[in-house]
């Protein structure tokens, strides 16, 4: 279930990443976008999940992601956890495989020294995408799936305790975003 604290946390995380990109000299947001790499990591992760996960694991993980599984029994939770753990590992693995393939292709064309830097930069992107998919999608869902309903971890936190620090971080990044948008 999406709560105010989760939403603010996600927005702040995106703001921090964009701010980090903005302060890098000569780097634009487009530097971090490579659609073939995104497609490979996402679809290859999906294929590994198709091969390795049971139908029930898929269903339980989908119910959990939609917020309907907070009252799920232990069997459903373990099933969703299996799926999310496999997804996390698959995302890292597919990103690593794509990185190695692109690195090998780039190293096979060493006759153009000017292309080595951009080639390595593009080769590293699928690894980045795999880590992001693993740590920012599967890991939070897995953490949520393993929390026990009604426990201290599961209690809704006071948004005011989270809101003030997030607002401070967001306000400090506004000048950085304006620089990114005008660049």
Image (cartoon, rainbow, N blue to C red):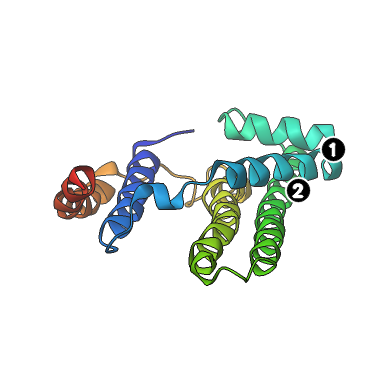
- Residue 83 versus residue 104 in the image, above or below: above
The answer to whether mark 1 and mark 2 are in CB contact below 8 A is: yes
* Towards the viewer: 1 or 119: 119
Residue at (59, 60) in percent of width and height? 123
Residue found at the far front of this picture: 111
Image quadrant of residue 26? bottom left
- Residue 165 versus residue 116 in the image, above or below: above
Residue matched to label 2: 82
Disc on res. 163: none
Q: Badge 2, how many Cα within 10 Å: few under 14, some, many 20+?
A: many
Q: Position of residue 89 (x, y in %)?
A: 70, 56
Image quadrant of residue 7? top left
If you read the primary sequence from the N terminus, does the residue marked by circle 1 or circle 2 appear first? 1
Residue matched to label 1: 54
- Residue 22 versus residue 159 in the image, above or below: below
Residue at (48, 51) in percent of width and height? 153
Please give the count of numbered marks on the rendered protein.
2
Label 2 secondary element: helix
Q: Position of residue 52 (x, y in %)?
A: 84, 45
Q: Badge 1, how many Cα within 10 Å: few under 14, some, many 20+?
A: few
Label 1 secondary element: loop
How far apart are the alpha carbons under marks 1 and 2?
Answer: 9 Å
Q: Position of residue 70 (x, y in %)?
A: 59, 35
* Towards the viewer: 143 or 115: 115
* Towards the viewer: 34 or 157: 34
Residue at (72, 37) in percent of width and height? 73
- Residue 39 versus residue 128 in the image, above or below: above
Q: Position of residue 33 (x, y in %)?
A: 47, 46
Residue 22 can be seen, yes or no = yes
Q: Is residue 131 left or right of residue 165?
A: right
Q: Is residue 27 left or right of residue 90?
A: left
């Amino acid at each position: 279930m999406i709560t105010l604290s989760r939403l603010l946390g996600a927005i702040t995380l995106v703001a921090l990443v964009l701010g980090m990109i903005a302060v890098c000299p000569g780097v634009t947001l487009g530097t971090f976008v490579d659609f073939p790499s995104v497609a490979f990591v996402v679809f290859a992760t999906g294929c590994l999940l198709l091969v390795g996960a049971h139908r029930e694991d898929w269903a339980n993980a989908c119910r959990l992601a939609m917020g309907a599984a907070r009252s799920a029994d232990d069997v459903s939770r373990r099933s969703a956890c299996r799926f999310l753990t496999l997804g996390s590992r698959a995302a890292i693995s597919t990103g690593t495989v794509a990185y190695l393939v692109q690195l090998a292709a780039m190293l096979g064309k060493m006759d153009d020294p000017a292309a080595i830097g951009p080639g390595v930069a593009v080769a590293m992107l699928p690894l980045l995408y795999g880590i992001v998919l693993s740590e920012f999608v599967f890991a939070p869902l897995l953490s949520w799936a393993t929390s026990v309903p009604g426990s201290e971890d599961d209690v809704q936190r006071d948004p005011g305790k989270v809101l003030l620090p997030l607002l401070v971080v967001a306000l400090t990044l506004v000048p950085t975003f304006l620089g990114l948008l005008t660049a």
